[in-house]
Structures are given as C-alpha cells and as structure tokens.
Amino acid sequence: MEPSNLSSFLNTKFFETDVLKENVEKTQYDNVKRKTKLYLDSIKKKFLQDTSSSKKTPAINKSLFIQKNALFIHKKSNTPQISRNITTSKWSNTIDTIIFAIFETPNTLSNKIGSCIVNFNTGELIFSEMIDTSIFIRILHKIQVYEPTFIVTPSSSSSPYYSKLITILKNNIPECTKMKHIPNKTFSSEKGFELIKEHTIEKEKFDSLYEEIHEKKYALAAVSGAMWFIMNNFDQKISNSTFAFRYFRIRFENPEDTMLIDSQTIRTLELVENKNEKTGLSLFSFLNSTCTPMGKRLLRNNILQPLTHQKNIMLRLESAFELAKKRDILTDTTKELKTFEDLDKLFSKLLFSNKIRNILSSETLLGITDLVNTYINEDCIWANNSYELQKQKCYAVKSGSNGLLKVSREVYRNILNEILEDIKMLSTKYHHNIAHGYETKRGFFLKIKKPVNSKIIDLPSIFINKSNKKSYIECSTINLLKANARLHEAFNEVLLISEQIIDDLFDKIKNKNISSLFMLAEAIAMLDMLCCFASNTIKYKYCKPVFADFLYVKKSRHPILENHISPFISNDILSIKGSSNFHIITGCNASGKSVYLKQIALLSIMAQIGCLIPATSGTLPIFKKLHARICNDSMEINKSNFAFEMKEIIYYLENISCDSLLIIDELCRGSDINQGLALALSIVEYMLNINST
Ligand SMILES: Nc1ncnc2c1ncn2[C@@H]1O[C@H](COP(=O)(O)OP(=O)(O)OP(=O)(O)O)[C@@H](O)[C@H]1O
C-alpha cells in the first residue's frame, strides 16, 4: 500500500470489521475466524516485542497525512501506481493485491465473460460482463488496465483440459500474475448478488445499481468467485489482511462506456509505455502532470479506456478549458493539490464543477475535518529526510490530556539533546570537524571530515565502526550506540501512545458516513486530472474539440513529437462517413506517414479522455474501438511474417464496426507485390462495407 495514496489510506481501517459471516458456510467462517484470531494474536505479540521503528512507521505516516484542513491528503512524488509487492502492516491490515476473477462457460459457443476486480489498494470492487471477441481481446485489455496479482477462474476452465481463454491468458499475462482455479460452484450469481448488497459502501445507491446488475449473471458469478477466493485463500500473507475487508466501493463497469483498445495497439501507440526504453516517453508520461497518485492513476486508466459518452467527455473538456482560461485559479489549484494544506480554500475557488464542490463541502467531511483537527497537530507536515520525519512522527498527535505522551516526548527530547551535546563535545575534544548524520536503522552516526589532500585520517580508538567515504569518515562511539538504542526505545514509546490516539480517531471517523471520503478521493483525482489537462492546454496551445459524425482536424500535430522536432509540420485530417472515411496514404520514405497515422489515433484518445488536442480546431467522431498496426521500426518488418500480419488483420476485420478507427501501416507488406495488392484491395473492400474509419 502506498501511504500517500488517499484511497489506500482510507480503506485500511474502515473496511476492517467482522468477516463475511452470514454469507459463508460454517466451515469457511470458522476458517476465517481462526485466521483472524491468529493474526490478531501475532499483531499483539509483535506490538509488544517489536522495537524496530521502521516497522512502526505506517501508523504515524497516516497521522501525518491528517493535516489541518487537509483531511487525509498527503503528497509524495513519483509513487509507483500499482505495486505488486505483497506487504502487510499491523496498521494497514491490507495488501497491494488485485484479484481478477473471470467467469466463463467454456463449453458454450458464446464468448460471454463475467469479470470482477477486487483492488485492495483502493478498496474498489469493479465487475463487468461482456461478449468477448474470439481471442478474448476485451478481457486481455482489462488485465492490462488493472494489472492483477491473481487471476481466478472456475476449475472447469482448466480441467480436463485448458479452455481457449485460459490458453490465451497463460501466453499473455506477466509472470508475476498468478493463476488460480477454484471450484465451479463458488461462481454463483445469486451469491454474487447477495455479496454486493452486503459489501457496498454506498447502501443508498443499491436500488439504482440493482436495475443495472440483476440480470448480469456472469458478472455476479465472477463477484462470488472473487470473494470466495479471498475468504479461502490459504496463503497466510494474503489471508491475514484481505479477509478483514468488509466494505468496498462497488462499481459495475459497462464495456460500452469505454473505447476498446486492443493490447497490441496500446503497445504500438506507446500509450503507457515506451516500446524502446522503459523510461522513454509514452502518451501517459508525456501528458502526466498530475500531483496526486489518485490523479495519476485516473489518467492512466483513462488513456487505456477513453470514454464513449459524449456528455461526459464534453463536461471534462469544458472544465479543463475553463481552468485553462482562468490561469490564476489553475495555478492556485495546482499549488494546493501539491501541498494539500488548505482544501477549503482550494475548493471554494472551484466554480466549474458543482458536483465536486458539493462533495467537498459535505457536512460529513467538515465533521471529519474537525475531528482530525482535534487529534492532529496543525503544523505537522511530511518530511523526506529520515531525521525530520522521525521528529514529525513524534509530534504529529496532539498530546491533549495524555500525560504519558507528554512524558515520553520529554524523554525523547532529552536523549536527543544529550546526543547532540555529546557530538559537540567530541568535536572540541578531538579537534576534528565532526558533523552527524541520521538513518532510520542506524540512528545517529558521526561524519568526520578528512583533511584536504589527505586520504588517511588517524582517529583515536574511541571512534568505532569506521567506514571510509569520499571526503569524510563515518563512525560511531560506544556512547553514541547506547544513546541511539535509548532514543529508539523512547521514540517507539511515543509511537505506541500516538497509535492508540489515532485508533481512537479512526473509531470516531468510522461512525461517520465514510463513503464521503471516497467521493472526496475521487473528486480530487478528477480535479487533479483536469488541472493536468488545463496546464497542458496552456503549455502546448491545445484546442477544445467538438464531436460529430465526421473527422476534421485543422493543423493537427503529434502531441509528443511536436516538442522534439523543429519545425514540426502540422497536418489537416479529414474523414467523412460515406465519402472519405477510407484513406490511402502514400509518400516517399521518411515523409512522415507513420507519424501522421499515429497522430490521428492519439488525438482521438486525447479527445475522448476529455483532454484538449494539439490542433487549431477539431471535430471528431466518438470511436468505440481503436485498432492500430503501426510499423515504425524497420527491424519489425524483418521480424514479422506474412502469416502473422494476416492473423492480425483477420482479428481486426472480425472486430471492426462502423464506430471503429482502424490504422494500418504498410498493409500486406510481407507479401509479393501482386498478391499483396490483391489482398489489400479485398481487405479494403471489406472495410468499406463495414463503414469504419
Ligand atoms: N509532421 C512532421 N513534421 C516534421 N517532421 C516530421 C513530421 N512527421 C514525421 N517527421 C519526421 O520524419 C521522420 C520519418 O517519419 P515517419 O517514420 O513517419 O516516415 P514514413 O513516411 O512512415 O517513413 P517510411 O516510409 O520509411 O516508413 C520522423 O522520425 C520525424 O523525425
């Protein structure tokens, strides 16, 4: 779990409570109960024994998020989005696990699939139902978007032999994703329905959700499979944490609501990852100027699944456009998003979205803010340096009437002063320039500067544990080691008491309507993404597109390359259904054909995520599917063979519809010129009949 991630933070304490008692059979319940007891016992034991401060930090990390008027938001840069590590902490009771349950009936002809993603990072449960393509492109796309740690399928998919879906999955998922097959009977739509009803955090919205989901038997079956897997997971590390969850942010994802981009296209267009260099630019890394992990995640998910509802896209576009026009608001908003010190001030300035404003002024949130302010010191901030961080952790919680906390802090302060005095004394006594450093594990250590032009320095025997660095020697003394141990103990004592106070705070917050906190997290993520779009608009001079049933973009540029090539030549793009929805682009080598093709796809994605586009004006259709086969690497031509290309084309032809955008670079290039031309013509004819773009 990333501590800076608001969503992760919120779910940790609030979701834990009793297990899914009513909905599991007796044996399962006993099993879970036994594990809970074991876990709590181990926590208690560890709690008393553990003197390692590094293991105790998460609690106070959380407390540090709770800043004056900032609720629980906290900044941390470059947070990896989805960590695959399985980590537990006694405070979080959660892990970075993403479970992806898939329900299929392999013996039937239809490729109907139900899926359920349970994301313990964010407390989300997202389920969906779809008719997939013959090579299960939709499900692979979902796997790419959510990057699960476990894929759970019914045993009938793997026995007596692997179904087509499982075979495709096995060849396409990363090694770190584990596949698990669980009994068929655990995939029950009735059970899935009950589980959703029980575990939704937004009970009041269940009736409206009912209409949408009650007939989605495959999706509901996947929900029940996922929950069964969570409750019956015998991997101690995982079960320790996950079963403690009780509520989720439940969402039914309709595949129709997002554009389908196949995984090959995601790679080809370098949407989230650069093909050549891991750290190279992708559309995501180029556009990303978000300040929060929630905003960053939202942006990535949106690039992989752009919207298809015009109204929603327009709302975003208008908001980003409005923000870009009101630069002072944008600057202030971004500044606030970065520091998270005064959310009230921040959101009172936002006039463009009533919804966000309503969420943020909700009385529940104000109540929670008051609570937080009662417990947490207002000037407590995050620190990157470990010594500063320890100090912040030490003084994060308001001591109030807790005499014990005051005393422990006094002890801590005294030892700290003693250490600093001691170092000063050593400096004077031994006539050396002695500075000090601090590391969480080591505590304080000495840094003795080497004389200029000398690599050797003769130190008295009082200095131990010497380690030679470039310009100084790191060492310690027996006294310092002892003082470090005492300081460590005193610090742990402060933490222990602070944690109890924070527990109390959590209990009080738990009684409030916590779904508001999730709405807050989502609102901030959206705000962050819109600010990111607005800053890009200003920085790169983007324009707001409109939507119609034809494509006409004036002076369009490639969003990334225009910043690397000077001068970049802009191009107009025109495509009208029935007359010019099919284009053949020819030109000499290196004339920019591939770049132009990519540009069309990238602009469509940008427009459909609500981001303004690099052009002077733009009208675009809303595409529901995007397939691109771009060859921008000469090596690729040699590697690929005709059969492979044809397989891809067959897939495209099977899947395109009138609202698809299809981009093919060098069609039939692997074949002889006459045969290639004949094939290309028939492919083109087929596409024209379908009326795709
Ligand atoms: N609109 C543009 N303005 C300026 N430079 C461009 C533009 N488009 C492409 N280029 C430059 O031209 C180079 C070649 O572009 P691209 O690979 O798209 O050409 P191509 O026509 O597809 O080539 P080939 O026929 O060899 O596949 C790019 O690397 C880029 O540096």
Image: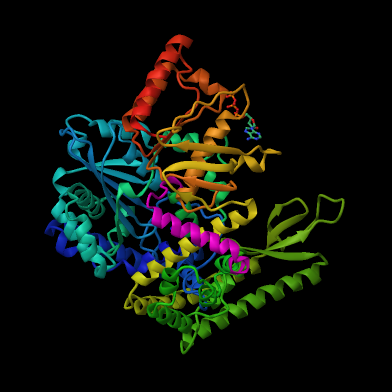
Q: Is residue 458 left or right of residue 301?
A: right
Front-lying residue, 538 or 441: 538
Vertical position of residue 148 compared to residue 121: above or below: above
Vertical position of residue 464 compared to residue 608: above or below: below
Q: Percent x, y for residue 370?
A: 44, 83
**What type of secondary structure mainly makes up the magenta span?**
helix
Front-lying residue, 213 or 47: 213
Q: Which residues are magenta?
A: 303-332
Quadrant hosting residue 89: bottom left
Residue located farthest toward the right when viewing the structure as drawn: 453
Q: Is residue 330 magenta?
A: yes
At x 47%, y 65%, the residue is: 524
Q: Percent x, y for residue 62?
A: 47, 69
Query: Is residue 302 visible to the viewer in this orientation of the structure?
Result: yes
At x 47%, y 20%, the residue is: 640
Q: Is residue 528 left or right of residue 243?
A: right
Indicate the colouring scheme.
rainbow
Residue located farthest toward the front when viewing the structure as drawn: 579
Query: Is residue 486 visible to the viewer in this orientation of the structure?
Result: no
Q: Percent x, y for residue 169?
A: 32, 35
Specify the quarter for ligand 1: top right
**The N terminus - image quarter:** bottom left
At x 31%, y 47%, the residue is: 255
Quadrant hosting residue 178: top left
Q: Is residue 505 left or right of residue 470?
A: left
